[in-house]
Image: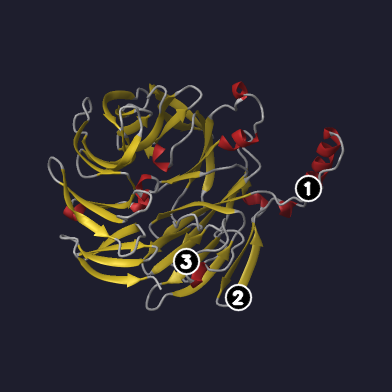
Amino acid sequence: GMSAGGDVDLLLSGDKALVLVSGVYGLYPAGKIASRAVDGPQLLLVDLAGAPRLISRYQGQGMLVDARQTGSTARVVLRSTPRIPFPEPMQADDSERTSANRKAVADAPVDAWLPSWSVTTGGTTEKGTVGCGRVSHPAQFSGGAMLTILTFDLGTARLGSGDPVSIVADGDTVYGTGTSLYVANDQRWRLQMWRGGANATPKQQTEIYRFETAGSQPPTYVASGTVPGWLVNQYALSEWDGHLRVATTDDNAGKSAVRVLEQRGDKLTQVGAVDGLGKGERIYSVRFIGPRGYVVTFKQTDPLYSVDLSDPRKPRVTGELKITGYSAHLQPAGEDRLIGIGQEASSQGRIQGTQVSLFDVSDPAAPRRLAQYHVAGAQSEAEWDPHALLWWPATSMVVVPMMEGFGASQAGALALRVTDNGLARVGTVPAPTNYPARRSLVVGDVLWTLSDAGLQASNLSTMEQLSWLPNR
C-alpha cells in the first residue's frame, strides 16, 4: 500500500499483476496507471510479460477492504453502503424527520442497495449488479453496509464480473486460508455515533463471518460468531485443525483474551478461552504458529505471553516474558525463534525509538529475549504494515525500513542477521534522498529497496550501493 496519498496494493501471479486501487482518496502519486481521480475501488489486471500492458479494468462501488490470494485465485473484499438521497433537514420535529427519512429508505429502489460494477477489456465494457440471489444476511444486524467478495483467476487473460457474493454486514479485517475466508467487523463505528455518557459506551465486540472457499469457485457464506473485544489486525485470527483462534482486547474490561471457536451449524461457537491477559493493557501484536500462540500486550512494560492451544477446549498461558517496550509485529524466524519489531520504552512506558528483538520460544514456560537492537528516536513502517518488513531465510537476514527522528535524517533501511544467539548488524541502506525505504526484496544476490523517490540496488552481503534508479 502507499501512504496517505491513497492505497495502491498488488497481487502477483506468474506474469500477471492485479493492482488494487482503494478509491478512497482520489488522486494518487502512482504514475499514469492510477493518476486520475477515482470514484470507488478499481482493480487493474496488468500483463508483465514484456512492457507492462493494462488488460482489464474493473470498477466497483464503495471501498476496498482487503484482498487475499491462494495460488492464482484472488479474492477481493469490497464494502459498499446504500446510495439513498435523504431529504434536506427540515425545521420539523424529530418524528417528522424520522418518518421523512424512513420514507426515503422505503422508496429507494433495490439498485440503491445492490452494488454495481463495470469491467472494461479491449475497449469493450460490461456492466452489472450483484443479483439478489447472491446476497446473504447474518442472524444479527451488523450495520447498513454490504460486503462483496469477488473471485478472479489471475491465470486468465481478462477480468470478468468476479462472480460477486455479498453479505449484508460491515467488516474491516480479512483473514484467509486455503479453504476459508474470514471477515471480521468490530463495532468501533458505533462509538462515533454514540452521544451518551461515558458509562453508556457500546459493548465492545467483534463479529466474524466465515466463507468457505474451494478452488476458484465463488465463496459460500457458512457461519458467523461474536467475541468480546477488538482485534489489533488480521494476525489476531488463525484457523488451525478445524478451529478458529481469536485474540482480542476489551478496553472496557481492561484485559485481553485468546478464544477458540468451532463451527456448529451456521454458528461459530466458543469452545475454549484463556482470559485476563495484560490487565489494564492492550494487545500490540499476535502470532499463531500451529498449536501455539504469542501475544504481546503493553501499557508500561511488555509481557510476551506464550499460549498453548493444542487442546482447543483448554487453551492456557504457559509462560510470559516481561520487558520494556513492545513488539508491534512478530515474525517467525526459523525453529523456535521470533523477531519482534516495535518500540523500546522507558519503565514508565514512554516511547524511545524502534527496537528489533530476537526471542527464543523453544521453552513454552520461559520465552526469553536473546538480543535487542535499538535505534533511538526512530520509527519503522513495519510497525504498522508487515509488508514493509523483509525476512530472508536464505541468509537469515531481516531488513527493516527506518525513519529516524522527525527530520528523517537517516531514512533508509537497517539490515540485521539472525545468528544462533543474537542479532548482528549487516549494515544500513541509506536513502539517496530523504525518503524512507517502503519495501525491500531480493533478486539473486542484490537487495532492492523501494522508496517513494526511487529504487536502489545494494550488495546483499555488504549493503554496498550498486545503483540508484530515480522515480521520474
Which residue occupies the foreground of this view, 19 or 217? Answer: 19
What crowding class fits label 3: few (fewer than 14 Cα within 10 Å), some (14-19), or many (20 or more)? some
Residue underneath mark 1: 86
Q: CA distance from mark 3 to mark 1?
A: 36 Å
Residue underneath mark 3: 30
What crowding class fits label 1: few (fewer than 14 Cα within 10 Å), some (14-19), or many (20 or more)? few
- Determine if residue 99 is in view: yes
Residue depicted at 34% across the width and 25% down the height? 315
Q: CA distance from mark 1 to mark 2?
A: 35 Å
Residue depicted at 63% across the width and 39% down the height? 143
| Identity, as a three-letter code, of the amino acid under mark 1 | Phe
Q: Earlier in the sequence, mark 3 or mark 2?
A: 3
Which residue occupies the foreground of this view, 95 or 335? Answer: 95
The residue mark sitting in front, 3 or 1, is 3
Along the horizontal axis of the image, is 362 left or right of 26?
left
| Identity, as a three-letter code, of the amino acid under mark 2 | Thr
State the SS at label 1.
Answer: loop
Vertical order, 103 against 253 (above or below): below
Residue underneath mark 2: 124
State the SS at label 3.
Answer: loop
Vertical order, 251 against 85 (above or below): above
| Identity, as a three-letter code, of the amino acid under mark 3 | Ala
Q: Quadrant of residue 73?
A: bottom left
Residue depicted at 29% across the width and 66% down the height? 456
